[in-house]
Image (spheres, rainbow, N blue to C red):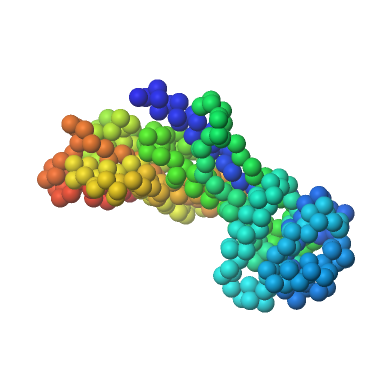
């Protein structure tokens, strides 16, 4: 079983390193010389009749009428071979970002439908910098899809086939003169990629994403980013330390319970630290107080607190923020075995308190108590 888990783990890591996302984002001036073969052109609804010169001749007659009616259109010809034009109400969106996510998802869906791999992104400056930043962030997030499905007729050794937009070139002249806006755009990309990583780890199923797998991911992050360190206390060492609550929760699982702590010191001159603690029950059967079958199906999501901490540290490693952060993962699988902890057991916490177990499906608070 352990050999099978390692094989699946390797497959999962391959998927996680090749997640279906916009992987590369470049920034260039908003000039026609920088327009490539494909372009996403986001305009205010009032600009439809007065579009930029490089597309004006194509936005006439029925094409213009359809664009006004549907708010989007794929236009052939002009400076780019294909231009996807999206109309938005910038006056409304400058006041609230509500609706911007839906627009970004629609744009990405259209690009994916045409199997476009690279595109430029030209957003009207009538939309303020903060909202243009948000649109880019949401466009990248829209590209994230967790998929381990093999293509039809594939052999098990073949990797899943992905059709994805993997590069976007943002055409925005203000970025060259506004360092703060450029930094915000860079951070939008970091946040979106951290989200995608978090999403994919979270959706990795329970037989793969064990406590050991989660520790591997923490070490993977620490190896990639020199600003991050990691340490762990595992199995018997955890029990000998006196952490009886989290040890009890995980004592029936093949992969031992553990507490994994990541540290990021972006401001060594400061004594101030932010502390994060993430619940990481990698699969929750409910223990001997077994969950009903359908209530158990999605319990690989019971690790999302820990998964979010991992995503945050990936973002910290890429962003180099001037803060200090420590994050601990409370990792255990609430499995069933002859060794399972039992209702009415009395466990002792790391702090020395005794805890009577009323229900083995209330394991999260136990794991978090020792980890905190």
Q: Residue at x 61, y 40 (%)?
A: 162
In the rendered view, tell whether residue 7 sits above or below residue 43. above
**Residue 221 visible in this rendered orientation of the protein:** no
Q: Is residue 359 left or right of residue 183?
A: left
Corner quadrant of residue 254 = top left
Q: Position of residue 289 (x, y in %)?
A: 19, 45
Q: Which residue is located at x 85 percent, y 66 percent? A: 56
Q: Residue at x 18, y 41 (%)?
A: 288
Looking at the image, the residue that sits furthest to the left is 344
State left or right for residue 13 relative to residue 356.
right
Q: Report the residue that reaches farthest toward the top.
A: 3
Instruction: Say left or right for 195 vs 109.
Output: left
Q: Position of residue 126 (x, y in %)?
A: 74, 72
Residue depicted at x 46% and y 38%: 218
Q: Position of residue 335 (x, y in %)?
A: 26, 37
Pick whichever, 50 or 95, lies toward us. Answer: 50
Instruction: Identify whether 255 is placed above or below 308.
Output: above
Q: Quadrant of the N terminus?
A: top left
Pick the residue in front: 89 or 243. 89
How many numbered marks are there?
Answer: 0
In the rendered image, the vertical position of residue 53 relative to residue 167, given as above or below: below
Q: Position of residue 255 (x, y in %)?
A: 33, 31
Q: Report if residue 85 is visible in the image.
A: yes
- In the depicted structure, whether residue 92 falls above or below residue 215: below
Q: Which sits in the foreground, 8 or 311?
A: 8
């Amino acid at each position: 079983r352990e050999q099978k888990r390692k094989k699946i783990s390797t497959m999962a890591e391959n998927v996680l390193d090749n997640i279906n996302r916009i992987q590369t984002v470049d920034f260039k001036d908003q000039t026609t010389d920088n327009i490539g073969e494909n372009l996403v052109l986001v305009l205010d609804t009032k600009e439809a009749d007065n579009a930029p010169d490089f597309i004006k001749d194509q936005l006439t007659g029925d094409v213009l009428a359809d664009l006004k009616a549907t708010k989007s259109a794929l236009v052939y010809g002009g400076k780019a071979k294909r231009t996807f034009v999206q109309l938005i109400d910038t006056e409304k969106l400058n006041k609230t970002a509500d609706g911007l996510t839906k627009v970004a998802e629609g744009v990405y869906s259209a690009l994916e439908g045409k199997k476009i791999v690279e595109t430029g992104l030209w957003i009207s400056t009538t939309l303020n910098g903060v909202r243009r930043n948000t649109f880019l962030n949401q466009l990248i997030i829209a590209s994230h899809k967790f998929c381990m499905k093999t293509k039809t007729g594939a052999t098990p050794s073949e990797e899943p086939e992905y059709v994805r937009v993997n590069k976007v070139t943002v055409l925005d002249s203000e970025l060259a003169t506004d360092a703060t806006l450029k930094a915000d755009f860079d951070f939008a990309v970091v946040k979106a990629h951290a989200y995608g990583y978090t999403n994919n780890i979270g959706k990795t199923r329970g037989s793969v994403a064990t406590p050991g797998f989660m520790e591997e991911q923490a070490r993977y992050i620490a190896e990639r980013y020199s600003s991050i360190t990691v340490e762990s206390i595992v199995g018997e060492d955890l029990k000998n330390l006196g952490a009886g609550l989290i040890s009890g929760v995980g004592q029936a699982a093949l992969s031992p319970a553990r507490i994994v702590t990541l540290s990021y010191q972006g401001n060594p001159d400061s004594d101030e630290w932010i502390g994060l603690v993430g619940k990481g029950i990698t699969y929750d059967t409910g223990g001997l107080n077994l969950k009903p079958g359908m209530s158990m199906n999605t319990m690989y999501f019971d690790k999302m607190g820990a998964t979010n901490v991992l995503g945050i540290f990936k973002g910290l490693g890429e962003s180099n923020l001037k803060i200090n952060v420590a994050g601990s993962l409370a990792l255990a699988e609430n499995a069933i075995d002859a060794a399972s902890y039992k209702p009415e057991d009395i466990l002792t916490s790391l702090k020395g308190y005794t805890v009577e177990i009323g229900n083995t499906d209330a394991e999260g608070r136990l794991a978090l108590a020792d980890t905190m």
